[in-house]
Amino acid sequence: MKGRPDAPHYGTREIALLSQSFHDMAQRLSDRSRYITTFAAHVSHELKSPLTGIQGAAELLHDDMDGEAAMDVSQRRRFLGNILADTRRLTALVQRLRDLAQADNPVRGGRTSLAAVWPELAAQFPGLALTAGGEDAAVAMSAENVMILFGHLADNAGRHGATALDITVAFRDWAVVVTVADNGHGISPANRDRVFDAFFTTRRDSGGTGMGLHIVQSLLRSHGGDIRLGDASEGGGAVFEVTLPRA
């Protein structure tokens, strides 16, 4: 008998798969919501500390203008120095947040020769003796993003006492693997599991924001790459293995 075709039949397996898909999506949204809440709390805390310092120093300087016992030059210079240090910290934090936003929402595509990046990296960090060897590889990432990620690794090395940075490039299947080793103080076993966490730093007193390695990880993963912390170098410094997509 002719008529309308039967409606599609969805069996138990299809319903189960659909249910699992909705469950996974809800879980991802829940995880993202928790991440945003935690991240916002961290940002608020990081901004509050230098802002409180700036406000306190500014109020003391303001009160000094009307006070009977005036500050001497060295006292004023100290408070002004504190204000400048806190504004530099705020500037660094804002730049890190911009880098993280770019890492989470990157403009994909591009092709960059790593050999062309190393001289620019060395010029940007003159305090590090940079050596690069291995393959001459091109990666599927813009030059700007490549500089952001290796710039953060170099900055991290310098903040932990490194004076030299050794970079080795190799091919591995579909990827380019870049090993970055420094001769700094290294990373303690207690901190190895936390180095990629946002706002985790042991160098806050020297201007560290705890965002650099988190930005590197986010940027790489958004391009299909990744980063891992390797075993310490012979000199005890940190070793990072960066995986990038081949161009």
Image (cartoon, grey):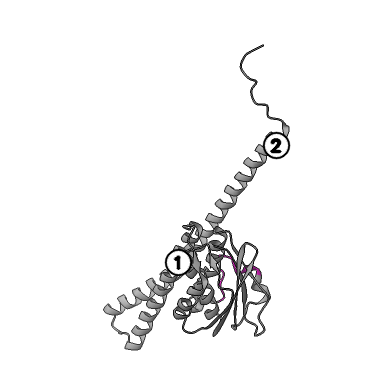
The dot on residue 144 is 1
Of mark 2 and mark 1, the one earlier in the sequence is 2
Residue at image x 43%, y 66%?
94
- Residue 174, given in percent of the width and then of the height, sits at 62, 62
The label nearer to you, 2 versus 1, is: 1
Q: Residue 208: percent from the left, percent from the top?
A: 50, 74
Would you call the spot at circle 1 few (<14 residues within 10 Å), some (14-19), or many (20 or more)? few
Question: Magenta stretch: dominant SS?
Answer: loop
Determine the CA span between mark 2 and mark 1: 44 Å
> Does the stretch in magenta take in 151?
no
Left or right of 230 in this view: 69: left
Q: Counting other residues with Cα less than 10 Å from the Cα at mark 2, is it few (<14), some (14-19), or many (20 or more)?
A: few
Instruction: Give residue 16's mark.
Output: 2
**Is 146 on the left or on the right of 91, as rendered?**
right
Task: Look at the picture and state if 15 lies above or below 235.
Answer: above
* Residue 161 appears in view: no
Amino acid, disc 1: Glu
In which quadrant of the rendered view does residue 164 lie? bottom right
In this view, the residue farthest toward the front is: 136
Taking the spot 52% from the left edge, 59% from the top edge, the residue there is 39
As shown in the figure, which amino acid type bears the numbered disc 2? Ala
Residue at x-position 62% and y-position 14%:
3
- Please state which of residues 88 and 105 is positioned toward the viewer in this rendering: 105
In the displayed structure, 157 sits above or below 143; it is below
**Residue 213, picture quadrant:** bottom right
Residue 65's quadrant in the figure?
bottom left
Horizontally, residue 79 falls left or right of residue 156, namely left
Q: Say which quadrant the C terminus sits in.
A: bottom right
From which residue to which does the magenta span run?
193-202
